Structures are given as structure tokens and as C-alpha cells.
Amino acid sequence: MQRIEHIYINGEFVTPHGQEWFDLHNPSTEEVIGQVRLGDEHDAQRAILAAKAAFPAWSRTSREERIQVLWRMHKAIAAREGELMEAILTEYGAPAARGRWMATYPADVIAQAIDALESFAFEEQAGSAKVILTPVGVAGLITPWNSNAGFICNKLATALAAGCTAVIKPSEMSAIQTQIVAEALHEAGLPPGVFNIVNGRGDVVGEEIARHPDVAKISFTGSSAVGQYLVSAGAATMKRVTLELGGKSPTLVLDDADFQEIMPLVLQAGFLNSGQACIAGTRILVPRSRLAEFEAVAKDAVAQFRSGDPRSVDTDIGPMVSRKQWERVQNYIRIGQEEGATLLAGGEGRPEGLHAGWFVKPTLFTQANNQMRIAREEIFGPVLTIIAYEDEADAIAIANDTNYGLSALVLGKSLARCERVARQIDAGRVLINTLSHEPRAPFGGFKHSGLGREMGRWGISAYLEPKALVASAG
Ligand code: NAD
């Protein structure tokens, strides 16, 4: 049983002022595997003070100095890949293949921030003005439980690249991953106060960061509801805000697609990260004229998907992160049936043979429409909905008829046609016949999926304020 007692402030592991202990679970067994001591408002204030004190010196570092520090971070985090993998499997239950990606991503994303920093233009000429991009100040970085280590490293590396200092409020549910990251970053020897990490509840530590006048910027990844709240909470102190929120992403299967060929992409997109992925392709739009054929191929393919022990190489889908999340997903499976959608695969309860753990059957609804709650609300589990469309225009209209706009996948034989369709979809990222990630491109959402962008030069820009110098020769 692991006890995580310290938070990280001003270059040191310190005992929090907060007294509350929070249980950590293994979602595959439901057992308590550890406890984390949570910080409170005082701890958040101490961390913000430290980041504020460190800001003047850090904001004046050169590009080269920042690159050196970021490479030290990269090396220290990369050395922890094995430990991160173990934590991700135990604390979070990601299936091994996904877990491997999540364990390597934290170091990779630091390297990507370095790549963006190397060519970033901090100054440019605009007419007679010299425009200088200056760091906004202390950044509050708030992360969710899915891929916690990756989000911490991405946000922190980008904030530091821009010249900001940071206070991180990671998800309290992923404290083992956070501890590994904190130890690695400590070893990297950053100047004290440049980054600080406070475990704590959202409505305590997160709230303090959202309201504190010395925090200039919030970068948040999490639910749309909390994201909306942060915009209003930050308004009083005019915070800059970047939000990466939820999704209800469409997968558009065009009528010329070879269903056998594309089905692995359709299901991998939908069941990504056990369905606990903001970008999961959960609405599968299929031509009505070929619906029966699609259903037959999909049913066979889903039968091959295994939900179970994340350590087993045969497993495609691990457990839900918590009992609450499991119950939420079960509730949506009930709602789908009550709304009149037909279960093509899966359904309520645990997969056969599993008697413990927050496992869900890979579930596929069909005969559904885009007005149903299972088509409109983010379920965050392995529950997908097939929706029939009449023609290409109808497919695009259904794809865009959503509050969200994070990601989309277009599948078809003709690249030109796929691109024509992709251009008409309101989403921050549209993939065509691939699930590959491009870290140099901006990432973020339209509509309720977020505000602003992360990654590449767009990510760095989000921590900077343009200052125009207009001079006369005198
Ligand atoms: P969440 O919104 O419940 O929590 C996210 C973080 O916000 C946690 O650290 C939490 O403690 C904190 N928080 C909660 N209330 C707060 C408050 N009042 N003030 C400040 N902070 C507060 O989300 P979650 O359940 O941890 O994560 C799942 C959600 O994240 C899903 O909706 C998913 O789509 C989204 N997500 C989005 C992306 C993306 O890049 N767009 C990536 C991953 C997850």
C-alpha cells in the first residue's frame, strides 16, 4: 500500500497543510492500493507564491537555457518509463498497448515542446512596430485522470518553453503517476519555484488556482462542465484560459468504403483508451443503403474485442477508472435501450467471467438517431452508437449537429472526396483513413470541446502576450 504524503513546492517535497487522505484504487480489482494526502487552499497559495517569485528570473531566460532545462526534464522522465507503465496499469487500468504509449508519451511530448521552441518566433515586425511575445506570468495547470502524466508534461513543458512558471493541480485520482513525474522533475534540477505540484480536490486546490489574482493563465484538460465553470471563475481576475474538453466525435463511413478494411479503425477509434478518451469516435455515421451490411461486419468485429485484465496481451479494453465511472457508463447503456436504440453487441453488466473490477462489455448500439442522449452526451466508456445517414450532405449535417467539435474521422476510398467532406466538419482535428497523431499540428476543440489550442507553436503562443513596441528615431 503506497502512501503519498508530500506535495512539491519551491523545489522541495513538503508536507501539505491539508489533512485529508484520499484512497487510490486498482480499477481491475477494486482494491485500495494507496492513499494520497491532499493539499488545501493554503498549500495552493504557497505554491502560487513560489511560482510568482520564480517568474521574473525564469521569464528572462534565453531560448537556449530553456531548451537545456527541457532536455534535462526529458531525460529524467524517459528514465521513469517502466515505473510509469506500472503505475498506469495498476492505478488506471489502461490495456498494455495503450499503457505503453501513455508511459512513453510524457517524455515524447517534452521533446515535441523543445522542437516547437527551437523554431518559435518570439519577435516579429508588424509595420513600424516590433512585436514581442512575452510570457503571461504564473500558469495554473489542471489535469484529468486519463493520461495524467502526459498532460502534466505537455502543459508544463509548453508553459516553461514560453517563459511562464507553473502551479500544477493534477487529478487526485492519479497520484501515483504524479509522484513519479514529481520525483523525475525534481532530479532534473529546475530552479526552485519554476514548477510546483499540489495534489488536491478540484473544488479546493483547483478553485484557489482559478480565483487567485497572481495566476495569469489557466490551462485545463477535463470535462466541459468544469471548463465552463473555470471561464466564469477566472473572469474576475481576467485570466487567460486554454480549455481541452470533452467530445462526441463522429466517424463518417462514406458509401464507397470497404467495411472489412475500415472496421479496425472504426472500432479502435471508438474503444480508444477503453473508451475513456476525449477524442473517441463514438458516433459512427453509416450510409442507410448499406446499414445491414455494416452492422453484420461490426458485430463480428466487436465479438473479437476483449474487455478484461489490462496486463494480458489479448486485452483491448481495460476497466473504467472508478466505480462512479462504471455506474455512469452502465446508466447510459440503460438509457440507450430506453430511448429505443437496438443493442448490436454488449449491454449492461460485467463481461462474462469477470466478477470484480470496473469492466464494461464493449457495447454497440444501432437503429439510433442523433437526438438520443447516447448520441449527444459524452459517455466516456466503450459504448458506441451507429447512426444511419441518407447522403453525404446528411452525413456532414449529422456530424456537425453536436455541441462538441474536438475530433472526427472520415473513411472512404477517394482521398479527394474524404478531404472535401473533412473540410466541412466543425472539429479541431479531422483524420482521414488514419488514427495517427501529428504533434506539430494544433490540438483543441470547436464549440463546447474547448478554447484555444495546445501543441506546436500554437501551444506556446497560448502562454504569451503580444507587446508592440512602436519607436520613433527621436
Ligand atoms: P473533470 O473535469 O472532472 O476534472 C479534471 C480536473 O479538474 C481534475 O484535476 C479535477 O480535480 C479538476 N476540477 C474539478 N472541479 C474543479 C473546480 N471547480 N475548479 C478547478 N478544478 C476542478 O474531468 P475528469 O473526469 O478528470 O476527466 C474526464 C474529462 O476530461 C472528459 O470529459 C474528457 O473528455 C476530458 N478530456 C479532454 C481532453 C482533451 O484534450 N480535450 C483530454 C482528456 C480528457
Image (cartoon, grey):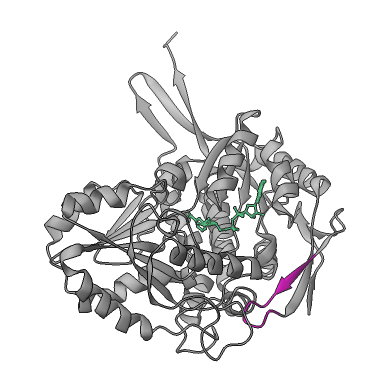
Q: Is residue 457 above or below residue 152?
A: above
Q: Quadrant of the N terminus?
A: bottom right
Q: Is residue 372 above or below residue 326?
A: above
Residue 41 percent across, percent down from the top left: 80, 45
Q: Residue at x 53, y 76 (%)?
A: 94
Q: Is residue 26 magenta?
A: yes
Left-right relation of 187 to 390: right
Left-right relation of 174 to 387: right
Residue 178 visible? The answer is no
| Quarter assignment of residue 62 | top right
Q: Quadrant of the C terminus?
A: top left
Q: Residue at x 42, y 49 (%)?
A: 444
Residue 386 percent across, percent down from the top left: 32, 65
Q: Is residue 137 magenta?
A: no
From the viewer's side, name the closer residue of 61 and 274: 274
What's the magenta region?
22-30
Residue 429 percent across, percent down from the top left: 34, 53
Residue 21 visible? The answer is yes
From the viewer's side, name the closer residue of 91 and 443: 91
Q: Residue at x 70, y 36 (%)?
A: 211
| Quarter assignment of residue 238 | top right
- Quadrant holding ligand 1? bottom right
Residue 196 percent across, percent down from the top left: 71, 52
From the viewer's side, name the closer residue of 161 and 149: 149
Left-right relation of 227 to 128: right
Q: Residue furthest top?
A: 474
From the viewer's side, name the closer residue of 93 and 134: 93
| Quarter assignment of residue 358 | bottom right
